[in-house]
Image (spheres, rainbow, N blue to C red):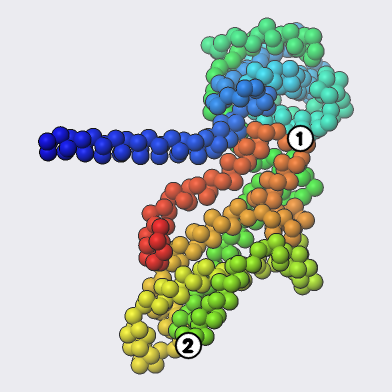
Amino acid sequence: MMNKNKIKCDFSERLLKFCAVFFSLLFAALMLYPLIFAFSSSMKDNAKIYDIPPKLLPDAANSISVVLDYSDLNFMNEEEMKDVMMQDNISTMFGLNYKLADSSIMEIHVYGTYKGKTVFHSRAHQMKLQMERDYGIYASSAIKSNVLLHGDRYKRACESIGYTFDTNGLPLSVPTGLENNFFNDVSHILSEKYPLNGSLVSVGNKIKNILNLESFKYYLQMPSYIYPESEHIAKYGFMTFVINSIIVIGFAMIAQVILCSICAFVISRLLSRKAGNFVLLFFMGAMMIPFASIMLPQLIMYQKMGAYNNYTALLLPFLYPYGFYVYLYKGFFDKIPSSYFEAASLDGASNLYLYTKICMPLSKPIISLIALQTFIGNWNDFFWAWMVTEDQNLWTLNVALYNISNNMGTKQNALMGLSIVTITPVILLSILFSRQLKQSIIASGVKE
């Protein structure tokens, strides 16, 4: 009878563990699905992102190589040869990018050959061509042959994309052994819609999935196309907003760690118990005031102080100690044995010495907890930074992401990609410092 009860108990315990693990994994998968879908969508091309029903995984990325031969043409000089090849290069790239948008062509190589030598080569990623169409040289233009080659547009486009030209031959050869899945489509498109000066020799393709990840490089460059009037954004792209966020959050972490600890030290060690509780109640009570109720008065006050549309407006709010962090510091300082302070005071130590040499060195768990919580809490901050900044050079990540999303030319895959870039630091820090965070919470006396 006892054996039966034991077997039954063991079975129930194993069943309970199995259910716990199963449901934990299930809910973890459900929580991670939006992140996985966003990452997958960011690697899709501009057409596949709108497929219905949507696919979780992106299609295989195609890299195609188009070889054009100019041996039958007679050129007056090298400049004329280069000019003709640049025209064909732009017609080929933008024509195929436009007409074969649903074929997951993420990279196009154009080779120009003359009398058996490769004299011209240009390569463009799909996102580079798309940005030129949406915001750059061909913004708001029809992708037609006469439009692509109008004036000096094709020259500027070639300079932006990049190319190499040498009549003596380039140190590269036309790739061989490629598949030939796109020849008929490319031949038809170029002959009917985008007539070329050179002769189409071959169209090879191969799968190159790393191109899906290369899209992120162009997502980071996208703001320089959208806001070309800003010198900093044109030069640094999305990194301008990353730097702004780092400046704001770095200041917030330093300010909160120092100011909250000073307030807590005064409350814990310099004020009477009754006065300390009253001051602590002030800080804790300030946490209960909804931001919506003080938003406009605070904004008006900052504007009159000159703290608007500048870094002062972004940094000044962090000079107010956050009540919960003051409470954490005070609780920790209260647990430090009084004998430490008494012994130091007998040796003539000042209050500054007690704070810097006793309280702060012992508060490393609290400091790491507050620094990490300040980073995570303010990395995603949006509303205040959006209210007090009009200058594009001052935008933080979330303000920039909001404004980019409101641009009519922004595609969903680019928006997903920038969102992934924005949330990745928080995820990485949470994973890397999860152990320190747990130890800090334990040391602070806060129950998990």
Quadrant in which residue 136 is drawn: top right
Query: Relative to the observer, which residue lies in front, 35 or 220?
Result: 35
Quick one: quadrant of the N terminus? top left
Mark 2 secondary-structure assignment: loop
Quick one: quadrant of the C terminus? bottom left
Going by the numbered disc 2, the residue's amino acid type is Ser
Residue 299 in the image, given as x and y percentages of width and height:
75, 66
Quadrant in which residue 157 is drawn: top right
Mark 1 secondary-structure assignment: loop
Quadrant in which residue 156 is drawn: top right
* Residue 406 against residue 212 in the figure, above or below: below
The residue at the point 60 percent across, 67 percent down is: 288
The residue at the point 70 percent across, 33 percent down is: 411
Residue 310 in the image, given as x and y percentages of width and height:
73, 63
Residue carrying label 1: 409
CA gap between label 2 and label 1 equals: 62 Å
Apparent side of residue 391 relative to residue 371 in the rendered image (left or right) = right
* Residue 265 shows in the view: yes
* Residue 395 against residue 121 in the figure, above or below: below
Mark linked to residue 272: 2
